[in-house]
Image (cartoon, rainbow, N blue to C red):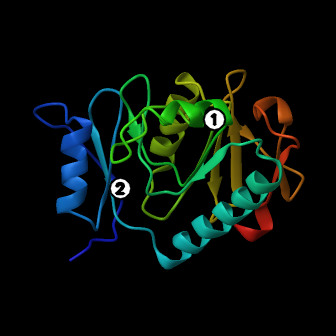
Amino acid sequence: MVNYGMAMGLDLLHRYSDDEIAELCRRNPEYEFERMPDGQLIVSPPASWYGGSREARLLLQLGIWNARAGGGGEVFSPSTGFTLPDGALFAPDAAWLDAERFAALRGQPRNKFARVCPTLAFELVSASDRLLLVRRKIEIYVRNGVTRAVMIDPERRLVEVSGADRLHVPWEGSPLLAIPRDALPGATEPLQIDLNELF
C-alpha cells in the first residue's frame, strides 16, 4: 500500500549507483527515488491528483513554447532522471534542454538516466515535500549548471527563481513568470509561464 506521507531521506550503508536506483524504481514503481550529491536517497510518494494536474499544465505550457521558440531544445517529464556532474540524481517536475545539451544525449544509452544537467529545471512543491529540501535541490541544480531553476509552491502561491547570480529570488507582481532569452540558449523568444494555471 502506498503511503501518501512526506518525502524522506535515507542514509544508506553504501552509495547507490544509477543502475541500482533504476532497479529500485523497477521493484517499487509506486515511489520515486532521487540521490543527493552525498549519496543520501530521497524517497517520495507518487503525485496526488492535484499535483499531477499541475505537472501536466506546466509541461503543456513548456511544450507549446518549445515547439514555437525552443530552437531545437527538448522538454522532459517528471519521470526523467538526470545524473548531474556532482553525482546527484534528480527527476525535476519539468525540464528543458537546449539544443546543444540535448545533442550531447545522442551518444548516451537510451535506457539510462540522462548524464547532463538540464538547462531549465522546475520543481513543483507538493504536500509531501519539505520546502527546505526542495530549496536545497534548487541550489544543487544551480551548482551543476542550470541557467534557471524554478520552485513553484501552488499551496503557498510562492515562486522562487534561481540562477548563478542569485538564489531563491521571489517572483512577485505578475501572473506571468518570465525567463529571459539570455537564459535560454538558442531560443527565439523568452519563456512565459502562466502561474494562474498552476495556482
In the rendered image, residue 152, in percent from the top left (x then y), is placed at 64, 54
Asked if 87 appears above or below 8 in the picture, the reply is above
**Which numbered tag is attached to residue 57?**
none
**Residue depicted at x 36% and y 39%:** 109
Q: In which quarter of the image is residue 100?
A: top right
**Residue depicted at x 26% and y 31%:** 39
In the rendered image, residue 158, in percent from the top left (x then y), is placed at 69, 54
Q: Quadrant of residue 44?
A: bottom left
Amino acid type of the residue that numbered disc 1 sits on in the rendered structure = Thr
In the rendered image, residue 116, in percent from the top left (x then y), is placed at 48, 31
**Which numbered tag is attached to residue 119?**
1
Query: Is the residue under label 1 in contact with that under label 2 (CB below 8 Å)?
Result: no
**Residue depicted at x 63% and y 35%:** 119
Badge 2 element = loop
**Residue depicted at x 60% and y 69%:** 56
- Whichever of callouts 2 and 1 sits on the residue coming sooner in the sequence is 2
Badge 1 element = loop
| Residue 123, visible in the rendered structure | no
Query: Which residue was labeled with disc 2?
Result: 7
